[in-house]
Structure formats: structure tokens, C-alpha cells
Amino acid sequence: MTDITLSPNLSRLFVTEIYKADLTGIAGFNDKIDELEDACRGVADDDVTGQDWCQKHSYLGYTSYGSVEDISRHATVFEELKRQLDIHVNSFATQVELDLSNRKLKLVSMWVNILDQYGAHSGHVHPHCAVSGTFYVSIPPGASAIRFEDPRLPQMMAAPLRLTSSRIDRQNFATFQPVRGTLLLWESWLRHEVLMNLSEEPRISISFNYA
Ligand SMILES: [Fe+2]
């Protein structure tokens, strides 16, 4: 452990880092995103258990979370996505300097989300994992953003809010609008939510956990 050297005025400590990549820039992968969209719809069409769960829990749309153990059995294009995810998750872990003690992060779950108009997903974390993220397959006009929450919020008690004009990394909530082909990664303890989807067309994404 090393003592830190503080800057003369302000120093930045305890950062929260979020990783973004645009997979449309990868040679040959743009077409794969269309394939992924078909594959996501295929998983939804075939998964009666998941459809029943969504209906029973008033989920506006479909999620394969908890009902389809291995979506790559439905289409090999999910394997191709996994190959990209492995590269980016490794890059993220290296850049934020996670000490993995010579072990590798491994994909432990991957699921499809098809959010219909007015659907949302309230704030949550992904327990028992190290890195989580989402790949955005179809983001039609009006499709909802993702919002991250300052993990220190429960400790803040009577702390004043930040000015709405304050720097984004000083605010307690950070909203980001993905587009088709965006990949986002974050550490699994970071609380996040999907805001209400206002697009008439479904918002399609694939989420995953690495442990
Ligand atoms: Fe999530």
C-alpha cells in the first residue's frame, strides 16, 4: 500500500469507471447485429416459460433471464458476440486494474431483453459477479436510456445535492443514451436502471455477467 500524494487543490479519489465500445466499427460485425436481432426475437418466440413469467409479473416485453440457461444454443451468433465480449471485458478489467490473481473473468450468464413501449427496469445490481454489461441490438427513436446511480448514495444522509450544472462525474445519477451497437460494461455492484421506453418499436438488448 502506498500513501497518496494530494494535489494542491482538489484530488480525485474512489472513481467509478464505465466502459463503452462501439461494435459497429468491428469488421464484419455490423451485419451480425442484424442477425442478433433476429436471434433475440427467436429466443423470445420459443421461450414459453419466459413469456408466461413476463405476463405473470406484468413485464412489458420479454426477458430470457431465469428461463433460458444458454441462449447460444438458439443461434451461433451469440457465440460470436461472446468472443467480442471476452475481449472487451478483459480490456476493461485490465484498464481499471482489477487484481484477478492470474485468473480470467468468465461469462456466467447472458440473456435477452425486449422492452416494449412503456416498459422499464427499476434500479438493481448484479450480485455474485465481477463485471456486468449490456450490448444494444436495437435502439429505435425514443428508446430509453440507462441510468447509473452513485454507489455512495446510501452513505450521503444529509449531504447537499450537487448543482444540476455540476460536472457529470460529481452528480449522483448519470443517464446515458446507447445506440445500436453500443457495448457498456461496469462493475457488477454498480446500481443501474432502464428508464421507461417510449419508442413504439421494442428496445432490444443483451445483458450478461462475468465472474
Ligand atoms: Fe442490469
Image (cartoon, helix red, strand yellow):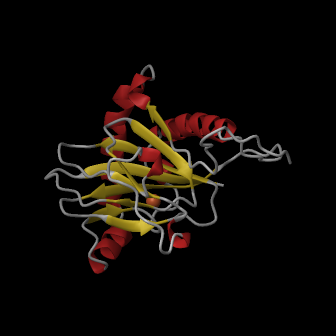
| Position of 188 relative to 104 (above/below) | below
Q: Quadrant of residue 8?
A: top right
| Position of 153 relative to 91 (above/below) | below
Residue positioned most to the front: 8
Is residue 117 left or right of 67 when viewed as pictured?
left
Q: Residue at x 61, y 39 (%)?
A: 92
Compare residues 133 and 110 and report the one nearer the observer.
133
Picture coordinates of residue 105, whole percent (x, y) = 68, 47
Q: Residue at x 46, y 50 (%)?
A: 170
Residue positioned most to the left: 200
Ligand 1 shows up in the quarter that is bottom left
Picture coordinates of residue 89, whole percent (x, y) = 60, 41
| Position of 125 relative to 211 (above/below) | below
Q: Quadrant of residue 5?
A: top right
Q: Residue at x 46, y 43 (%)?
A: 184
Compare residues 65 and 9 and report the one nearer the observer.
9
Q: Give the total of numbered labels.
A: 0
| Position of 134 relative to 60 (above/below) | above
Quadrant location of the C terminus in the rendered image: bottom right
Picture coordinates of residue 25, whole percent (x, y) = 41, 23
Is residue 88 left or right of 194 when viewed as pictured?
right
